[in-house]
Image (cartoon, grey):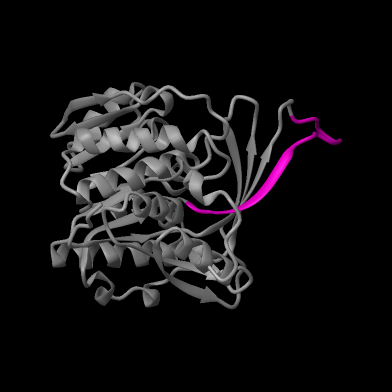
Amino acid sequence: MSRTAGALLVVGDVVTDVIARHRTPLAPATDTAAEIRTLPGGAGANAACWAARSGRCEVRLLGRVGTDAADWHVRALRHAGVRPLLVPDPEASTATVIALVDSSAERTFLTDSGAALRLSPGDWSAALLDGVARLHLSGYLFFATPSREATRRALRDAREAGVPVSVDPASAGFLTELGVDRFLTAAEGAEVLLPNADEARTLTGRGEPEAAAAELSRRFPLVVVTLGAAGALVAEGGTVTARVAAPGVRPVDSTGAGDAFTGAFLAARLAGADPARAAEAGCRAGAEAVTVVGGRPPDLQRPLPAGA
């Protein structure tokens, strides 16, 4: 498949995921049997890997990692076809997430942001936009002062360079802690907002995803709200313009499904797809993502080859 002329630059989190799948409810103060795997993850890194998998564009990833796991993550990203632009942090360990996945494939996260949210304005340079056709910002970076300032500078420089910017709000819980107004102010100027239904509700106070999508699209030119197994909504100019269905699958682990949607959606947009067609590509990727453990494409779930 031919590549487009410009690259996708993702600025986001790189995380070590510890995924524990338990078939029975958690038993407090004793043992619960589980299948546990340690895998490379992170919303930004996962999205980059799914975008690269499309083969439609060059994908680059800027993030901050601890020296404890930097080499492992660099190898994993290169193996996925992503060009890593990782900043090693000698003082903080790599971000770690423990994902508790129940029998319905729903996940609950315990998050240690580690080095990820220590990305700083000094790690950013407008020169990183050279050759870039789209910039994507992972919302997790909006939840700490240094990384939020770095994303604001990246967004400002991208707008000045005429590079469209997308933002994934990332976490309804963290949005509530930060404050909706602070997040919306930090994300101002983005062309595309990619929330899930819970995040869209949090950002608007609207109970129905359709109403939330429409309201957000009065602030951002294009809003795509993911609905899990129900697909996605596309909204522009205060109106829902498309409803996209998701393929029916048997879920194993919902970790990273939204990241898969984001990566495939952005790659399709770079290849010239309209928003509805790009959302269809995103839904296909999201459906595929829930059929495997972890947030990366299925072909990346096997061990890395030596020297990768």
Which residue occupies the foreground of this view, 302 or 16? 302
Q: Is residue 30 magenta?
A: yes
Question: What percent of the width, then of the height, locates residue 181?
Answer: 33, 46
Which residue occupies the foreground of this view, 1 or 84? 1
Left or right for 47, reference 192: right
- The quadrant in which residue 48 appears is bottom left
Q: Is residue 72 visible?
A: yes
**Residue under the point 38% across and 77% down:** 122
Left or right for 214, reference 71: left
In the rendered view, would you say 86 is above or below 159? Answer: below
Question: What percent of the width, then of the height, locates residue 14?
Answer: 50, 60
Which residue occupies the foreground of this view, 141 or 296? 296
**Residue under the point 56% across and 35% down:** 253
**Residue under the point 35% across and 39% down:** 195
Question: What percent of the width, then of the height, locates residue 57?
Answer: 27, 57
Left or right for 265, reference 219: right
Residue extent of the magenta highlight: 26-42
Which residue is farthest right?
A: 30
Left or right for 96, reference 61: right
